[in-house]
Image (tube, helix red, strand yellow):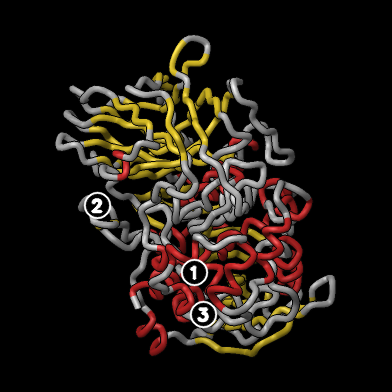
Amino acid sequence: MKVICSLLMFALCLSALMISYCEYFLINVKLSFIGTFFVDTRDGEKLATDVYLPEKEGEKAGQKVSAVLVRTPYGKKKGVEIYYRFVQRGYALVVQDTRGREESTGKWQPNYYEVEDGDDTLNWIAKQAWSDGQVAMTGGSYLGYVQWAAAASGNPHLKAMLSNVCAGSAFVDLPRRGGCFNSGMLAWAFAMSEQKFDPDRMVRDDWDAVLDMRPLEEIPKKALGREIPFLTEWLAHKDMDAMWRRTSWKERYAGGPVPALILSGWFDDNGMGTTEALDLVKNWPAGTWKTILGPWKHGGNAEYDLHGIYMGADALRYDVDLQSMMWLDHFLKGADNGIERTPKVEYYTLGENQWKTADSWPPENGKVMRIDLKGERDSYIYDPDNPAVHIIDMSENEIGVPEDYTQEEKREDFLLFSSEPFKEPVTVTGDVVAHLFVSCDCPDTDLVLRMTDVDENGKSVKLADGVICVKYRNGFETPQYMEPGKVYEVTIRTTKISNMFLPGHRIRFTVTSSAKNFIFPNSNTKEGYNSESKQKATVTIHQDGAYQSYVEVVTYCI
């Protein structure tokens, strides 16, 4: 049951604050469920949509109100009580099954229709007799993705977003992080394999065997007894093409700023989606965006300990729900509550275990530090039949969690680059950007970069990571294969982090070519991750002269 609750948490959470007021709301909220409606899309499908209106003493019958829209693929009735708080606040609540899910008609193809369907739904809300024409959106994960998709349409009725752990574009986030194919999303795909969400399909004791099945198209049939059409469709599109580009809300963004409160965590599975959101809004006018970034996984602002790693006494925020309400009240009701004048960025620094503020992301006044990668070895042999492990519980469906990689780093197919122990605290905040000069005796392979914090006892805890399929080093549209004896520059951008490396600790970067449970192993052939034929690859990360591999981090003084 722990696994099921984890998925429901990230799928349904409004804000990162996981305090349940459901029982209170069920008893005390005065609301009117006015029915299920079917919103017509421009191509003739019908989206099942529930509408709840506030009933407060003293309000005139027929008074027009702003709406909060939730679009979900997990079932509009599941956990709807957590959104009753908006009705308590005087907003209409509109909850919709996305296309092809639950009661809505059409084909379920994740991400593909959400720009147009979001636009059509916003227009439908604005035409209702109870609507004042203003709409906000809320929700996490896929429910965050659909907000940015709706905003990308440029719809004038969308006035605010509460974006929580939002998913991003295919080749940056999921399902093709860095051009690799995310095996870690397979549990989610199983749960979404039929029209009704079924989290029980995530829980298996044979995930190792399932991940080894080839070709990948056969996995659903062998493991579930049925095809997963959207997974088959994904696998049919090997490179970035029109299908994938249609799903990228960032690339398709056509409107102006939509005031966005962006919530995420250092260990969020969709952390690169939030990275895309922060890249998009960074030049928006002051007061139109704000972000809160905490020591949280994809489940949000819920735990002090992540996989046995203590996040600190102040890891949880008990004001996020209030800030969310203030954001909506300001941008939909014109409340002069000052939320737009608060710092643009609130973030938590691990190690120091303190919340900080900034006016930009990454925070201003940082110093870019170049760290040359120097290690005892410069090459390794990667065997796709013996991949290194990305340490997660597949059934938990949390890909980004921190873990102790001390034992995994002893493998022969790891390169370790460690600093000397720090004499003074060193704080790194932002993204890590690695510039690796690589040669390989195979046409393709993957590169997995991790940054870890190594304590005085040698315990190495993952803080951030990034991956890339090397054939996509110059773009995801057209693969460019390697030739033996040639050196290629490969750039990797990691997930976000803020961490203070304490005295006695070391910063470590590791490079390898596999991460089972996260990405399907590259075969080192031109067929990449979906090949039954495989070959070993000798990979060299050059460390001198014109081919000195290095990383760039942004450091801050205390």
The residue that label 2 is drawn on is 309
In the picture, the quarter occupied by the C terminus is top left
Among the 4 quarters of the image, the one containing residue 192: bottom right
**Residue type beneath disc 1:** Ala
Q: Which mark is residue 198?
A: 3
Q: Which mark is residue 320?
A: none
* Distance (Cα) linking label 2 and label 3: 30 Å
* Eye-nearest disc, 2 or 1: 2
In this orientation, does residue 29 appear?
Answer: yes
Is 257 positioned to the left or the right of 141 in the image? Answer: right
In the picture, the quarter occupied by the N terminus is bottom left
Where is residue 367 drawn, in percent x and y? 40, 22
* In the foreground, 10 or 122: 10
* Distance (Cα) linking label 2 and label 1: 24 Å
The residue that label 1 is drawn on is 11
Q: Residue at x 52, y 86 (%)?
A: 31
Among the 4 quarters of the image, the one containing residue 227: bottom right
Among the 4 quarters of the image, the one containing residue 175: bottom right
Is 380 positioned to the left or the right of 192 in the image? Answer: left
* In the foreground, 490 or 344: 490
Q: Secondary structure at mark 2?
A: strand
